[in-house]
Image (spheres, rainbow, N blue to C red):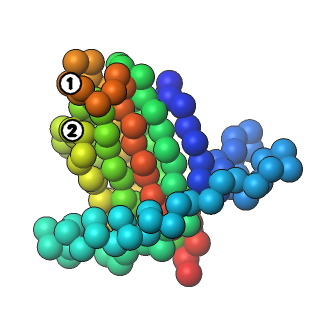
Amino acid sequence: MDAWLLSLGWFWATNPYRMLREVDGHPVPAVPGNFQGIADRVMERAREIDPLVGPTPRIQTALVNFYPPGKGMGLHVDADEKSGNAVVSLSFGQDTVFRIEGRDTLLMSGDAVVFGGPARRARHGVLGARSGTSDLLEGRLNITMRQMEER
């Protein structure tokens, strides 16, 4: 993965993999208060399409990822959160392809993706941001919001 990441609420540390609330004595920045309202509205619309997406997550963390043109994130499974509530993802900037369990969906600037219910632990990733597909920015900005703890 070639991206710049900003963790809000919790920090994903590696070697060993673990979740932290502070890094080097500094607290992880809080999730902005309006993120919960955004997630609530996205989940309402998602449930109109597929009621199996499950309950609305209580937003405890958000990852803000910037992908330069041509860069994406390999296939992976979000297996470390205790909560099984849906993930709410927002995309801005260049188009990309979201791949989940072998199915590809084009994501354009302003799109939202929810994967919850049976798809919550599905293998997923994004292909490279497509140059020339956005006047907003060169690259792609993604905000992924989720609940970490069961309650």
Sequence-wise, which precedes: disc 1 or disc 2?
A: 2
> Can residue 144 be spotted in the picture?
yes
The local crowd at label 2, few if under 14, some if 14 to 19, many if 20 or more residues have their Cα within 10 Å, is many
Residue 133: mark in rendering: 1
The local crowd at label 1, few if under 14, some if 14 to 19, many if 20 or more residues have their Cα within 10 Å, is some
x, y percentage for residue 114? Answer: 30, 59
x, y percentage for residue 51? Answer: 20, 76
Q: Is residue 73 left or right of residue 128?
A: right
> Can residue 84 be spotted in the picture?
no
| 29 in relation to 141, above or below | below
At x 51% / y 67%, what residue is drawn? 33
Q: Secondary structure at mark 1?
A: loop
**What is the spatial separation of the Cα atoms under label 1 and label 2, in whole angstroms?**
8 Å
Identify the residue under disc 2. 108
Query: What amino acid is labelled 1 in the image?
Result: Thr
Q: Secondary structure at mark 2?
A: loop
Which quarter of the rendering shows the C terminus? bottom right
- Mark 1 touching mark 2, by CB under 8 A? yes
Q: Residue furthest bottom?
A: 151
At x 39% / y 42%, what residue is drawn? 142
x, y percentage for residue 82? Answer: 56, 69
Query: What amino acid is labelled 2 in the image?
Result: Met
